[in-house]
Structure formats: C-alpha cells, structure tokens
Amino acid sequence: MKLVTESLETFGADVIKLNVSVADRTAYVEHFSTLEARTMVEALNAKSLGASLLERGEQGDEVQRCSKRECFGVVHVLGQVTLFVCGFAFPVGATEGNFTFLVCIACSYALFKKAYIACLSLRANVEFLMATAMLGSLAQGSFREAASVGVIVTLMDTVVWASQMQVDRLLNNSMSVPPSTLSLKDGSTIETSELKEGMVFIVRAGDGIPADGTVVKGKGAVDESRVTGEAMPVAKEVNAKVYSGAVLQSGFLEVNADKDVDASFQAKVLESVKQAKNSVSNTQVVVGKFAAWYTPTVILIAAAVAAAQEDFKQFLIIIVAGCPCALLGAAPFVQAATMAILAKRHRFLVKEANVLESLARMEWIGIDKTGTITTGQFKLLNMVSLNASYTQKALLQRAAAVETKDSHPLAQSIVQAYTGCLVAFAGSEGLPEITKFKREGRNGVHALIESEEGELERIGVGNADFLATLKIPLEGEAVKLYKEWSLEGTALFVTIDDEIGGLLLMDDSIRGDSFGTVKSLKALGIQPNLLTGDKETAANRVARKVGIEHIHAKLLPDQKANLLLCASHGNAEPVFLEDGLLGTYKRGKIEVGFVGDGLNDCPALANANVGIVMQEVGSQATVDAASAVLQGDIGQIPAAIVVARRSQKLVIFNIMLALSINLVVIFLAASRSLTLWMSVVMDNGTLLLVLLNSLWPLCWRVEPVSKDDGVEVSDTGGKLAYRARGDSLLAGA
C-alpha cells in the first residue's frame, strides 16, 4: 500500500483521489484527464508491483481546477494590486499617478455597493466604515491612502476567502456526491438530476450509486462505508436494497430507482451538510447585537476625538481601527471548521451551528436501547447440553438445522451461531436434513432428524410454553438454569424426543463501545439515561451491563419526548402531559440530548436540543427529525462532545482577542500613533489572526471510544483508561 501511494504521489495534483484495497490487490484512482492511466501503470511497474489496467471508468465531466468566478476574482485582485504599484511610479500629486490610484479605488466597487446597501438600511457595517475612510481620504486629496485602504481590504478578503474555501472543501468532502451522468437500461445516458422513480439505471464497478433503489439484475460488492460506517463491502444481488452515496467496488448492477435523486437518503443528508455552515448560532446572534451598538459607539468616539483634535483624518483612522469585522467572524469561522472536522473524522453531521453549541453545553442525554446501545440483532450468549450423548456443538447443529425452516429472527440467529457467515450447508460440518417440520404457534418448532445411529429423533426448540405443549416436564438442573438465564436474556430449550437436551441463552447483543461510551459521558459530566419502550427486565439487564443508573422503560414515543422536556426543566421524573399539550410545552434551560435510531424515536429526536440519529439506512423520518446524524459508532459521541466544547472555548477566546486588539488600536489611533493605512492593516490583520486561530479544529485529534478496549474520552481528549473486553465464547466438545 505504501509503495502504491509513493509511486502515485509523484504525479502531484493530477491524482485527485486514491483508494487502495489490500484484500483484492486493487487501487482505485480518480485523476485528471491530463494524466493517462497507462502512465500510472508504468510508474507502479517501475516498483515491480506487476500492475495492469483492470477496469477503465467512464470519463467524467472535465474537472475545473478553478471556476470562472474564481478566475475572475484572481485577475481582479492582481489587476488592483498592479494598478496600486504602478501609481508609485509617478511623483506625488502627479495627475497620472492620481488617475491610476483613482482607477485602483474604482476596483473596490463591490465594497462601495455593500456600503450603499448598508446606508439604505440605516446600518453601519464593516463596508460602510471602510468606504467612509476611502471617500474621506479622497475628499482630503489623499489618493494614495484611499487606494491603500482598498488594496489592503481586497488582499485580506482574498486570504479570508481562500481559507473559507479550504474549509468548504473539507465540509463538502464529508459526503459523496452522485455522478453527473448515468446510463439507463435502454442504453441512453441522462443527467443524474433527471433520474426519476421507476427508472432502471446501470451501475458499473467504481461508480457511485446516485439514488436509493432495488437491484433487478446482476450482483456485486458495494462499499457502504460512507452511508453506514461499515468498512466491509456488502454483497448485493437481485432484490437487494442499495442506497445513494454507496460505491460499487466490483461487479455489475441494474437498479430500479425507488426514489427520485433529490428524495434519496444521501441527497437529504448532503443538503444538511451544505446548509450547516450557513446556519446562525446563538453566539453569532449575541455578537451581532453587540456589534450593532458597538459600531455606532466607535463612530461617536471617532467624531469626539476628531473634534477635540480638530483633525478630520483622525476620525477616519479611528473608525477603521474600531471596525468589528474580526469580532463578527469570531464564531462562524470556528464553527465552520468544527462542523467540517466532525463530519470528516467522526462521521458526525451537525445540521445547524446552534446544535453545535447545545452539544457543548449538554448536561442530560437519553439513549434508546434497541439498535443504539444494542445492535438490534440477537446473539447466542451461552449454551449448556444436559444430555450426555450430545456435545454442545452437536446439539447446536441439530437446533440450527430445525431453525433453518423458521423465519423468526431468533431462528436466524441460532442458525448463524452455528454456520457463521461462510460455512457451506454441506459435508460433515454442514447441517443435517430434516423432515416433518412443524411449528407450535409462537412457542417453538420441531422436526425429525436422523441420528448418527440412523434412528429418527424429534428435535425441538422453544420456550417454556413449548415444553407444556409437548408435555415435556421442566425439572432438575434445567429449572435452575432457566430461572438464572431468564434474568440475563431469552432462555430457550432444545428438546430431544420427550426430554430437555439443553438450554440456549439468546439476547440482543450490546455494541462493543456502549460501556465505554456511557463511562465517558459520565466523565464529561453528562447524565446518561436509558429510554426504551421495552419491558423493565430487559431494560434493567442492558442498563446494568453498560453502567446506566437512570432507567425509564415501557415508554411510548410521546412519553419519551415528554420526559426530555421535563428533564430540560430539571425534573428527575416525567410529569406526563395531557394529549395535545406536548407541542406547546417549551424546553427548559438545561440542554438535553437524545440518541435513537427507529421511527418510534422521532418525537424524542425532534424535542431534544441535540437529537442524534444512529443512521438507519432508509429511515427518512428519523433523519428529518434529528438535528445531527451519526454515521459511525456510538463511541464517536463523547469525542464529538469534546470537540464541541473545545470549539466553544475557542470562540470565546476569539471574541476576547478581537475586542482586546480593537481597543488597543483605537487607543493608538486616538493618540496619533497610527496612519490610515496602518489602521487598515491592523484591522484586517486582526481578522486574519482570528481566522487562522479558528482553524485549530482542523488539527484536533480526539480518539473515539474503541470497540475493542473501551478507551474513554476526557474533556481534554485524552485516554483515561483501557478496559479489555471480549465476547463470550461457546466451548465445543
């Protein structure tokens, strides 16, 4: 992998993206058309890698390294700077020099336009102050100073714009973008935006899937890591569901679109990501209100000083020195970088900047059980054989054979417990044939299986009621095990003819990082609460295993939302409201969060300050109701909280930094220690300093809670402790 990367790095920016699959010895390269595939193959073979061109993807639309608007902007900046430099070639006061500076000033037309709009709305903004300074200098005949203000503002705006573009690229790269064109089954090619529900489109190896759909022909391996967070490619064949944003790694698929492109799952989440940086947080609102009073105050101070010193130029210098542009940029720069890094590294998509602040202040969090703390899939936790003639492995083999004919989720889990994912249903290690399969209602199933001696045995799997139906007595050691295991999960009996052959302990398996996540939340000062609609015994069992003390079971969807609202007011227990009042009940001062994954969690997700959905592919309602989408594991939540808290501290620091520098510059300007151009440099330099300081989130590395060792996350992002955990192993005799 290192050799491949080093070989292709020599092509520099011509290689847009490189993914190397060590498992199938394949490198997927996205590159500009100026770099030929043959050239890359030759470079790889120069390292004796034995490379060949496996598949050639369709040539996409030409990728513009710089858009027309960006090119025009660069030319505009270079032209204005050139005019400013040329103006110094003429003597001071020369007509030619003044004209050159005047044209240079005219290049700041965008600034004057914004200032004019501010005048119409009776609002003194940054552009108004700068335009006033430039026009005031012109009125005094200082063409050079007026031009210097325009050039410095343009240069600083360019630096800010370039930095924001870099953040935007990070934000946009957190989601995959559908291809621009695609091929239909009839051989025609259409724009991706024209794809409608019911159309059958073709997906080739390396193509991104543009819309949610169902496979109607072909098979292949699909990389859904950007959709589900699962790194292992998923095999897809006829009737399998595929989702927008996934990539077909190998194979060929014909897919019937279940939804339009704009209505597909990935499109909605992508839109949320694009809108995230444009949302306004509470901090920005407060700073904006402060700036609305701050700017007129600076103008009054400047007028008073200029009147006292009888120098109009001092008025211009002070209003530029007190410009609040850095103050206004203190919060949004940090929040844009933070949301970008949360999406990129932690797969945590925040829809609004306001949610980021709530995440940092969160004190109480409700967590759903099934599918959130647990995987939502039953697993064989333990097994005991009570028949000396059968080992655990042999007994499980026969139970799995019977359950192959049953469609119940528990049946599938029992079969998978024996076969795993790769063992074939044949040979000595396969499953034996069964006959006369019969279901006894919802209690269990049984069938005939030939024993090693050639005799037929009736093997059954079911609950206690199943034993009563078959008139098999529950006695001896089985009674004790049944009582103990019923407290730990679902206890099932395996019967052999007319007696109990053994017991199986099944339960919804807990996610590997759930325990570490709960412990990390407590370390961060957040109270975790289990909110579930399941019965109390199951809720208590799961809560005990992951370390949650506050448990609320048997909750209906509206009751979960009710509890969240009560918690925001500091109530330890919910006071259930009458029907119809839930929507009018407002949140309290305590910031509360909720983590869920199912449709029944929608009311709670919508009523929480921070509603986090564990992305359940295809569940549109949960994503719409939530304020954040977690595409990774639950262990990313503590890391996201740490990043959010750091960003809040950084915002406060930026505000204090901007205010402090502004006050110092105003004082220097009032004491005649600054010229106009120096004041402009100081003001824009402060903005640049705040911007650069705001990029710190891009350097933060906060480790999530690990599945393997349960690494905890502290408020400083450090690793507090390691706790080795492993799944229970079923011993085979």
Image (cartoon, grey):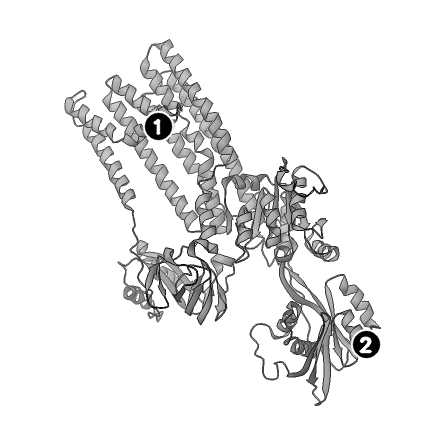
- Locate residue 481: give its quadrant: bottom right
- Locate residue 120: give its quadrant: top left
Q: Residues within 10 Å of mark 2 (few under 14, many from 20)?
A: few
Q: Residues within 10 Å of mark 1 (few under 14, many from 20)?
A: some
Residue found 30% across the figure and 50% down from its top = 65
Q: Picture coordinates of residue 94 (x, y %)? A: 16, 21
Q: Secondary structure at mark 2?
A: loop
Residue placed most toward the observer, 368 or 71: 368
- In space, the residues marked 2 and 1 are separated at their CA atoms by 88 Å
The reply to whether the C-beta atoms of the residues labelled 2 and 1 are less than 8 Å apart is no
Q: Is residue 566 left or right of residue 478?
A: left
- Locate residue 98: give its quadrant: top left
Q: How many marks?
A: 2
Q: Amino acid at mark 2?
A: Lys
Q: Is residue 674 left or right of residue 366?
A: left
Kindly identify which residue carries mark 1.
117
Q: Picture coordinates of residue 374 (x, y %)? A: 64, 58
Residue placed most toward the observer, 296 or 566: 566
Q: Is residue 135 above or below residue 572?
A: above
Q: Is residue 442 left or right of residue 627?
A: right
> Which disc, if any, is residue 471?
2
Sequence order check: which comes first, mark 2 or mark 1? 1
Q: Secondary structure at mark 1?
A: helix
* On-image quarter of the C terminus: bottom right
Q: Is residue 21 visible?
A: no
